[in-house]
Image: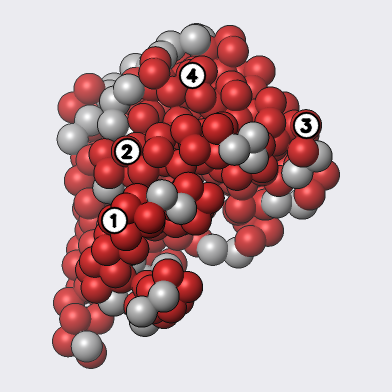
Amino acid sequence: MSFEDMLNRARSLVNENKIEMALQVYEELLRELQQQNDKKLLAEVALEVSTLLMNLENYDKATELSKLAADIFKELNDNADLANALYNLSISLMNTGRASDAVDYINQATELFKKSNDMQAYADALYAQGLIYYEIEENEKALDSLQQAVKIYKKQGNDDALVSIYQDIASVLADLGDMTKARKFIKEAIAVADKIGDPSLIADIYTNSGELEELNDNLKKACEDYIKAAELYADANMYDAALEILDRAESYLNDLPKATAKRLRNKIWDMQEDYKKKAESKKGAE
């Protein structure tokens, strides 16, 4: 079987969701390419497999293959593919707890994407750069990178990216002690998610907001956000998620003023009773 046939076979298996079989074909192809010293195709396949492994959250192996690809693309002076390999390498390193090692790679990738005028890739690299800086607690740099990415996503009308990045900006601002601005970005995320029209997505945002409030000892606001999240999960027929987040809200009621705790407790109990019945009815229908 030719290299091209093996590559097409692996891709077909991925499309059929036969991932383990696909990985076996990819591994065999990589071995043969290394033996034949076909550097260009070896790097291209290594990059492709690293992306697949990242989607599978196998970041250790993705790190190995993206580093291999990056080294070869650099040797070949292929800056377009080098940028993608460095991006994968930095994301993989961050997700294996090595964000400090990822900084130089993501900075190189960001500059290469900027020079290429691929604004989507440049925005995504800036986003990743911001997250990596956040991981190593360089919050001012993180905020700068994330806000640069926002400008591009806005121009592109990339609502999915905006919903996500607004929440990450809120987390950075909360760590910087500016909950007023953090709440503003949570509201921005909710507004964009509302346009998308997915109640579970908005519920996720309220859950994240509750976590930020909780970390900043604003337990009343955290409970209220969790209750709102539960209502939205229920709207999406996600009753187990709704009940789980209500349990989290209920766990903090004893830390609230008695009148507030009583009001929220009664609401939570009513919701729990309603959602348990609906969850049982849903399971029965299945």
Query: From this viewpoint, is residue 264 visible?
Result: no
Query: From this viewpoint, is residue 108 visible?
Result: yes
According to the picture, the residue beneath numbered tag 3 turns out to be 115
According to the picture, the residue beneath numbered tag 2 turns out to be 64
Q: Residues within 10 Å of mark 1 (few under 14, many from 20)?
A: few
268 relative to 224 in the view: left or right: left
| Amino acid under disc 1 | Arg
Q: Give SS at disc 3.
A: helix
Q: Position of residue 29 (x, y in %)?
A: 33, 63
According to the picture, the residue beneath numbered tag 1 turns out to be 31
- CA gap between label 1 and label 3 equals 34 Å
CB-based contact (under 8 Å), mark 2 and mark 1: no
| Amino acid under disc 4 | Val
Mark 2 or mark 3, earlier in chain: 2
Please report the residue visible at 22 percent of the width from the left and 51 percent of the height from the top: 244
Mark 1 or mark 4, earlier in chain: 1
CB-based contact (under 8 Å), mark 1 and mark 3: no
139 and 73: which is toward the camera = 73
The relative height of residue 104 versus residue 112 in the rendered view (above or below) is: above
On-image quarter of the N terminus: bottom left
| Amino acid under disc 3 | Lys
Mark 4 or mark 3, earlier in chain: 4
| Amino acid under disc 2 | Glu
Mark 4 or mark 2, earlier in chain: 2
Q: Residues within 10 Å of mark 3 (few under 14, many from 20)?
A: few
On-image quarter of the C terminus: bottom left
